[in-house]
Image: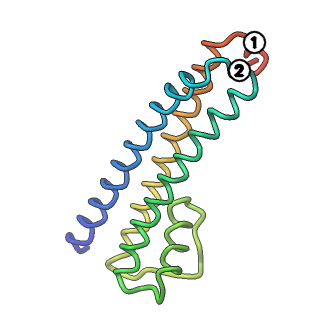
Amino acid sequence: MNTAVIAAGALVMALCLSIHALFMFAVLKSQVEFRRRFPRLGGIRLIVSSILLATILFILSSLIQILIWSGLFWASGHFDSVRDAMYFSGTTYTTLGTDHHAVGPPYRVFEPLEAMNGTLAAGLNTAILFAILSNLGRRHSGFEEFFM
């Protein structure tokens, strides 16, 4: 197996997870700022708006990561267009997979690395969203019915 290709994939994965960590920080910081700016917001409006704000930031983070991975796939020479590389990257990141394209050796190692990247990001997103909901439930009265 080509060590340089593995190193390139590992570096891209590290870059993407670093970007995701920055977005996780932004999500947590935005939650504090959101509650500071809208102190009277409560109930279902608070839950929906808090989760929507976090989700939008996580989607943006994922799109950036998919673009980075698609650039790496496109540079490997296995795709006729950037659009095809982006589609392939999106299906790999989300672990949906596709049978429309295949990446040949030695670049096929990028596929499981991107899938691991996407799986880790999805797990971190779930943890943050759960923490936001738990925090809302603990801090605001009247949320008991949402957590029973």
Q: CA distance from mark 2 to mark 1?
A: 9 Å
Q: Write down the quadrant of residue 76 in the picture.
A: bottom left
Q: Are marks 2 and 1 in contact (CB under 8 Å)?
A: yes
Provide the residue designation for mark 2.
Answer: 42
Of the numbered discs 2 and 1, the one sitting upstream in the chain is 2
Residue farthest to the left, as pictured: 4
Q: Write down the quadrant of residue 51 in the picture.
A: top right
Tag 2 secondary structure: loop
Residue at 43% x, 63% y is: 112
Number of residues whose C-alpha sits closer than 10 Å to that of mark 1, classed few (under 14), some (14–19) or many (20 or more)? few
Q: Write down the quadrant of residue 12 in the picture.
A: bottom left
* Residue 148 placement (x, y as % from top left): 76, 17
Q: Which amino acid does the dot numbered 1 rest on?
A: Gly
Number of residues whose C-alpha sits closer than 10 Å to that of mark 2, classed few (under 14), some (14–19) or many (20 or more)? some
Residue farthest to the bottom, as pictured: 80
Q: Which amino acid does the dot numbered 2 rest on?
A: Gly
Q: Quadrant of the N terminus?
A: bottom left
Q: Nearer the viewer, residue 106 or 45?
A: 45
